[in-house]
Amino acid sequence: MTMFGTMIKIIRTEGPLKLYAGLSASILRQATYSTVRLGGYEKLKQLLLQKEKNPSVLQLLLCATTAGIAGGICGNPGDVVNVRMQNDGQLPSHLKRNYAHAFDGLIRIVKEEGPAVLFRGVGPNINRAILMTASQCVSYDRFKSFFLTNHVLNEGIVLHLLSSTLAGLVATTACSPVDVIKTRMMSATGKDVQSSALRITLNMYRSEGLLSFFKGWTPSFMRTGPQTIFTFIFLEQFKKWHTIWHSNKNDTMAIQL
């Protein structure tokens, strides 16, 4: 079934609000996952720029890896709840979890299954966080540097828009296989609960083929693309405002002295 066919089926059978199933968990995940990895990457990059004027791709990848590991661990509980809430509609009635919201999901998981379940799939999630941070942040920085160095574009909103769009394409393609494996691990029921990431990968490859790892690429890009674009556009503005604020603060302190 195509993405739009799935959307129409959900609207007809469960109502339009089901398209937003797991919204609270998705917000919780972004608040714990994206803030840590993006903030961590920017901080590490700033420290690196104090020593290296033009850091290499390898150095930026190391920053992305460190930030990705931290983000993957912090965001995993919210991700488990998010996947379960979004996957509930596909399960038979006796297996539905029916979490009321993200915090209800966290509390019930700890009570009913134990706190360790909140970190189920943390390995693939860390791998995805590393891939996402590297493919998003590093590719954005490299695309932006390329356009500026070759005088294709000047600093501004058009540069940020084009660089972030290309970074979104890279990130969606790089993370698609890990996304599919992670989702299957976190939404597993019955005997599949104990399956490792490697076993799920091998089973998918044997039974469904290589293209199965890119299932859902289009809806994934429709989510990751705009998210990447808005993230970097807002991030650039926040950095600009922070620089202005910091400069004004220093000027005020200098006048007082």
Image (cartoon, rainbow, N blue to C red):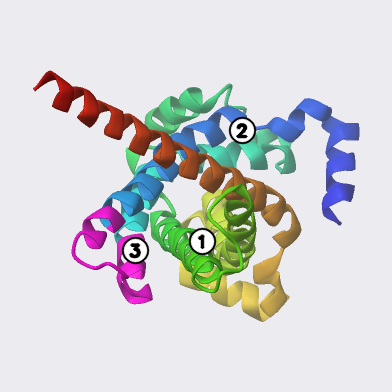
**Is 149 situated above or below 223?**
below
47 magenta-colored: yes
| Residue 99 place in picture, x, y as percent | 57, 26
SS type, badge 3 = helix
Label 2: few (<14), some (14–19) or many (≥20) C-alpha neighbours in 10 Å: many
| Image quadrant assignment for residue 51 | bottom left
Q: Which residue range is magenta in the image? A: 45-65
Horizontal relation, residue 75 to residue 165: left or right: left
Identify the disc placed on residue 140: 1
Residue type at mark 3 is Thr
Foreground pick, 77 / 208: 77
Residue type at mark 2 is Gly
Q: Which residue is mark 2?
A: 22
Direction top: furthest residue: 256
Label 2–label 3 contact, CB within 8 A: no
Q: First in sequence, mark 3 or 1: give its number.
A: 3
| Residue 213 place in picture, x, y as percent | 64, 70
